Every structure is written in C-alpha cells, then in structure tokens.
Image (cartoon, rainbow, N blue to C red):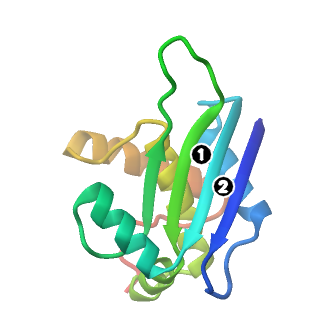
Amino acid sequence: MNLDLDLQLASDADNLPRKDQLQCWVEKALSGYRENAEVTIRIVDSAESQSLNASYRGKDKPTNVLSFPFEAPEGIQIDLLGDLVICAPVVETEAGEQNKSTIDHWAHMVIHGILHLLGFDHIDENDAQEMETLEIQLLSDIGIPNPYEDNT
C-alpha cells in the first residue's frame, strides 16, 4: 500500500493517537480497495467540529468524525481519496460513555471515516449492516473488540 497521509493537528487535546497508528488504521480500512491513496486527517476541537457539522450537515453540534470525499473531475485520475475531520473531545467523551478504550475508539472512528470516503454508508438498514460488519472485521483483525457490543 502506498499511502500519503497528511496529519493536521488543530486540537489542544492530550493523548492523541500517533501518526503511525493513524496510518496503520487507514491502511487497514483501504486494504482490498485502494493500492494508492492520499488522505488528510485533521484532528480538531469541538468548536471547529460544530462549525463544520452545522455548515455541511445542518447539525449544530460537534460530532465524532466528518468525511469529505474528493471527487475528481471526469477523466482525471488522482490518488486523493479525501479528508477526515475527527473531533478529539467527542471521541474521548464517547469512549468513556461507551466504556471503551479511547485508542480503540480512535481506531474505530478512523476506519469508519475511511469507509465513508470509499463510498460506504449507513443511511438504510442494509447499508448499515454491511458497513458495521466490515468495521467489526477490520477492527477484529487488529485486535480491537466489536465496537457495537454494549460494554456497560
């Protein structure tokens, strides 16, 4: 896999994943789908996440991960897959609320976001089931338990 990962840190949060961890998770999600890819991961705080979520999804609150797929003009081939914007405080809060390891939740959010960039979605039940099954398998492959099991 030839991955060009651009990491942008726009958060004051502590205990963020290392770039090599992010790269590993991105590569895992892309395995079998892309041989070459360029991806930007921007780690942000709540204010930026909320602003982007309001602008692009009409939801005036911060969210865990936003995916912005790149769509090349017709006839142009480029390795740019798109951008992920991940809100560090939301990931931290959700991990605590769901009794999950924070680093495991980071891995899930990266894999989830990359699958969105690849075109997977969870709008209807069948698509959601397909995407969740794939997430569970990819996470299991790297030793992370099913993120959808109730850990309370």
Q: Amino acid at mark 1?
A: Ala
The residue singled out by tag 2 in the image is 25
Residue 19: give x, y in percent of width and height. 76, 64
Residue 23 location, x and y as percent?
73, 54
Checking the image for residue 29, the label placed there is 1
Q: At which x and y percent is residue 2?
A: 79, 36
Name the foreground residue: 129 vs 8: 8
Q: Amino acid at mark 2?
A: Trp
Q: Is residue 21 above or below residue 93?
A: above
- On screen, residue 126 above or below 14: above
Confirm whether residue 59 shows in the render: yes
Q: Residue furthest top?
A: 75
Decide: is 46 above or below 149. below
Q: Is residue 138 left or right of residue 36?
A: left
Q: How many marks?
A: 2
Q: Does residue 137 show up?
A: no
Give the secondary structure at mark 2. Answer: helix
Quadrant hosting residue 49: bottom left
Which residue does the image show at 45% across and 47% down from the upper left? Answer: 68
Q: Nearer the viewer, residue 14 or 129?
A: 14
Q: What residue is drawn where x is 36% and y is 73%?
A: 50
Q: Badges 2 and 1: C-beta atoms under 8 Å apart?
A: yes
Report x, y in % for residue 124.
20, 44
